């Protein structure tokens, strides 16, 4: 069974792109931070040939701030700023306690009063939990985990073979 995008996913890129990457990631995972920069480079290289989807997979036992960071990103999404919060969290990964998350909300131009009022409300937690559960259902057990065109990618995402593999989908 191939993994498919759903209506609640956070997506960058055109639906017609020949390459689709779905990433399951944890905002506090150092390997996910590396993959964040790797995906940015790949997006620049592939442009319109890439559609990128981010899903939450917080490893709460290892990363005590991961769930709150994911909920903060979902709270920002309610103000159409998911990707800005996504980026600022990964770029400041060492400082993602609740105080800093509120500071980041200010930095990216959110209505901070609304953000603080909404932060932690059930729908945002449920979105994070739904992403996590779909990961479990699709055999995700570590972060980051990538699916390329619906199929789990087992190789090394940090070396040139990943980019070569992705380019093989461009006709």
Image (spheres, rainbow, N blue to C red):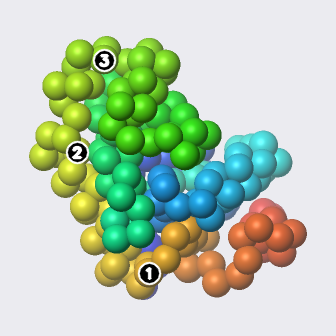
> Compared to 92, does 132 lie above or below?
below
Numbered mark located on residue 71 in the image: none
Q: Secondary structure at mark 1?
A: loop
Q: Is residue 98 left or right of residue 17?
A: left
Q: Please state, as top left, top right, bottom left or bottom right, where the N terminus lies in the image.
A: bottom left
Which callout, 3 or 1, points at the residue further toward the start of the chain? 3
Q: Please state, as top left, top right, bottom left or bottom right, where the C terminus lies in the image.
A: bottom right
Q: Nearer the viewer, residue 135 or 18?
A: 135
Give residue 54's position: percent from left, percent from top: 48, 54
Q: Residue at x 22, y 34 (%)?
A: 119
Q: Residue at x 33, y 37 (%)?
A: 98
Label 1 sits on residue:
141
Q: Secondary structure at mark 3?
A: helix
Give residue 14's position: percent from left, percent from top: 58, 44
Which callout, 3 or 2, points at the residue further toward the start of the chain? 3
For label 1, the crowd category at 10 Å Cα-Cα, with few meaning under 14, some 14 to 19 and many 20 or more, is some
Q: Is residue 88 left or right of residue 81?
A: right
Label 3 sits on residue:
112
Label 3 to label 1: alpha-carbon separation? 34 Å
Give residue 109's position: percent from left, percent from top: 44, 15
Whether the residues at callouts 2 and 1 have beta carbons within 8 Å, the answer is no
Q: Residue at x 73, y 55 (%)?
A: 38
- Residue 99 visible: yes
> Compared to 75, does 33 lie above or below?
below
Which callout, 2 or 1, points at the residue further toward the start of the chain? 2
Label 2 sits on residue:
124
């Amino acid at each position: 069974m191939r993994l498919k995008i759903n209506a609640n996913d956070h997506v960058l890129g055109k639906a017609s792109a020949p390459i689709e990457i779905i990433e399951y990631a944890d905002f506090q995972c150092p390997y996910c931070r590396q993959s964040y920069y790797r995906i940015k480079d790949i997006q620049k290289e592939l442009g319109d040939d890439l559609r990128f989807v981010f899903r939450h997979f917080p490893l709460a036992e290892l990363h005590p701030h991961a769930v709150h960071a994911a909920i903060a990103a979902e709270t920002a999404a309610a103000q159409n700023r998911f990707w800005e919060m996504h980026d600022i969290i990964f770029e400041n990964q060492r400082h993602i306690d609740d105080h800093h998350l509120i500071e980041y909300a200010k930095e990216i131009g959110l209505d901070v009063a609304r953000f603080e009022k909404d932060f932690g409300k059930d729908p945002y937690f449920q979105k994070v939990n739904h992403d996590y559960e779909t990961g479990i259902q699709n055999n995700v057990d570590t972060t980051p985990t990538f699916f390329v065109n619906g199929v789990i990618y087992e190789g090394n995402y940090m070396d040139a073979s990943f980019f070569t593999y992705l380019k093989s989908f461009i006709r």
